[in-house]
Amino acid sequence: MAQLKITQVKSQIGSKQNHRETLRSLGLRRINDVVVKDDRPEIRGMANTVRHLVTVEEVD
């Protein structure tokens, strides 16, 4: 199964509560944190919600 590498590139300070909770659910706490998750619709949706705070790369 393909995987996604999600990197937090901007601070969550000043973001909406929902966005902060989404980052926490993804496992991101601070700038430059990286997580690798399975490429599933749920994960893509969460990454799309905070797309202005993270970068997403596909990992083979």
Image (cartoon, grey):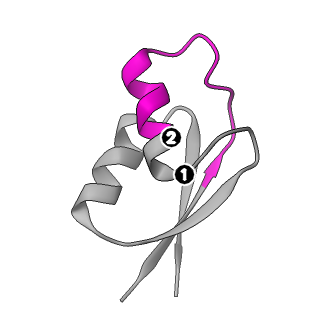
Query: Residue 58: image x %, image y %?
Result: 50, 73
Q: Is residue 54 left or right of residue 46?
A: right
How many residues crowd around disc 1 within 10 Å: few (fewer than 14), some, or many (20 or more)?
Answer: some
Question: Magenta span covers which residues?
Answer: 7-23
**Residue 50 percent across, percent down from the top left:** 45, 35
Categorize mark 2 by other alpha carbons within 10 Å: few (<14), some (14-19), many (20+). Answer: few
Query: Which residue occupies 23% across, 62% down?
Result: 41
* Residue at the image position 52 percent from the left and 32 percent from the top: 52
Q: Is residue 57 left or right of residue 29?
A: left
Residue 32's place in the image compared with 37, above or below, is above
- Quarter holding the N terminus is bottom left
| Residue 57 sits in quarter | bottom right
State the residue position of label 2: 24
- Residue 37 colored in magenta in the image: no
39 shown above or below 11: below
Give x and y (percent) for residue 46.
35, 46
**Label 2, label 1: how far apart the Cα atoms are:** 5 Å
Q: Residue furthest top?
A: 14
Residue at point 68% right, 31% down?
Answer: 10
The three-letter amino acid code for the residue at tag 1 is Gly
**Most extreme residue toward the right, as rendered?**
32
In the image as oriented, which residue stretches furthest toward the left? 41
Magenta-span inclusion, residue 17: yes
Number of the label disc, if any, that sits on residue 27: 1
Amino acid type at mark 2 = Arg
**SS of the residue under disc 2:** helix
State yes or no: discs 2 and 1 in contact (Cβ < 8 Å): yes
Vertical position of residue 47 compared to residue 23: above or below: below
